[in-house]
Image (cartoon, grey):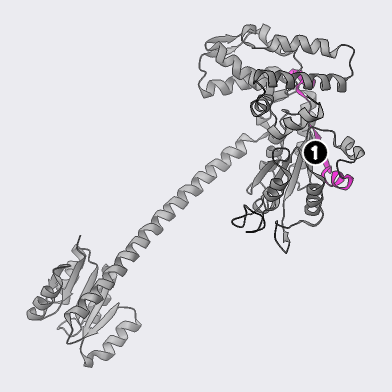
Amino acid sequence: MKPKILIVDDEQLVLNALNRALNKDCDVILSLSGRAALQVLREQAVSVIVSDQRMPEMTGVELFKEAYKIQPSAKRILLTGYSDREAMIEAINTGQIYHYIQKPWEPQELKQLINQAVELFTLERENSRLTEDLKRANEQLSQENRILTKEVETHYTFDSIIGESKPMGEVFALMKKVIPTNVTVFIQGETGTGKELVAKAIHYNGPRKNNVFAAQNCAAVQDTLLESTLFGHKKGSFTDAIKDQKGLFEIADGGTVFLDEIGEMSPAMQQRLLRVLQDGEIQSIGATSTKKVDVRIISATHVDLKEAVRQGTFREDLFFRLHVMPIGLPPLRDRIDDVPLLVNHFISKNVAKGSKGIAGISAEALDQLKTYAYPGNIRELENIIDRACIITELGVIDISSLSGLDVIHVNRKSTLEGSTLPEAVYDLEIEMIKRALSQTGGNVSQAAKNLGISRMGLYKKIKRFNL
């Protein structure tokens, strides 16, 4: 579409001349007076207004003052004679005109000036549109953020941690004490007991809930990558460092960093973490200076860190820095009373996801679930119920739907007879790893997923057990 140009002059011959010079490239509207021009502006949007300064009843500068009230974004060009210099200067100083051109004007010069004015008008209008779009997008994003934050806070309330048994009551009591503080928390528990869920509940119900919660499994990545992930790196500090990258400690400044499987951290990384806990400082890979950060550290592990300290694989000074407020999560076999609650919770989750034909679970099946040892803890129980919901499709989950559970149950009884608890856990862990590797044809990644542990964690267990 051609840009719409309003030309105002009290002489028809001048209007005609301007029309001939501009109508090829512009949609030209002609007005013989300022009053008529104002009426046009009330009815039509224009890009540029070109007006003579000397006109009866209303001068060009006076017209522009009124035009600004109607269409402030239209660009205004004043045609002046030498004697109109004072009016021109006033118009420039008060911001009433975009430009001026002295008489006698040259058609080519006027065309060029109008083209520039049209480009500026178009650019400003587009910028204004983009600004409004961005404002609306930000408002929508802020609203969605508030909704998501509320959902996250709701998801990680105490109600999201299922349990009414005495051991879980003790866990809840400790959580209530640490939540309003910024104290460093250490969570001890077997794989699948819900360590990250507890960490998130502490964060999202505490004073840092409006800031970032960043989680990292220390066993899931190699040492060099873990260092970059936690502390960041500078461009060019190593081969693949093509740009500066912030680490989790800097990203979560003011929030919480959750370090899962802290017992798998190398001595070098332990030293770097100790500096964060002692001085609140981090240093990116390749950086020459340190940065102060304010993060709450929550760590977790399934291994006995005290034993690791005795064996010299974990720093004693770091252990005491992390072990300020320990929370021990009981394995599911020690809180069997919670199994019915958990089963109903997982069935409800499956129904919400589309398993609408599941009506519940039989008493016999529930009794069977209450006699099982759950080496994979809550995560394993959830997997069992998920499979049962798929197998059942309609009606009530019964014993026949508990795929593979009987075999494990028999093996567990034979394993426990005449064994100490550490021996039984050791034997059962080896048995489950062997079975997972056998079921997946030796696929370590899939076996690790089925076991509910990281690929790196499984590799370390295979090496430790010499499998």
Asked whether 87 or 122 is in front, the reply is 122
Magenta span covers which residues?
A: 313-337
Q: Does the magenta segment cover residue 324?
A: yes
- x, y percent for residue 149: 57, 43
- x, y percent for residue 137: 44, 51
Asked whether 265 or 15 is in front, the reply is 265
Whether residue 363 sits left or right of residue 3 in the image: it is right
Asked if residue 227 shows in the view, the reply is: yes
- Identified at 80% across, 38% down, the residue is 263
Whether residue 276 sits left or right of residue 379 in the image: it is right
**Placement of 453 over or under 364, stated as above or below:** below
Whether residue 63 sits left or right of residue 95 in the image: it is left
The quadrant holding residue 69 is: bottom left
Q: Mark 1 sits on what residue?
A: 263
**Placement of 84 over or under 68, stated as above or below:** below
- Identified at 74% across, 29% down, the residue is 191
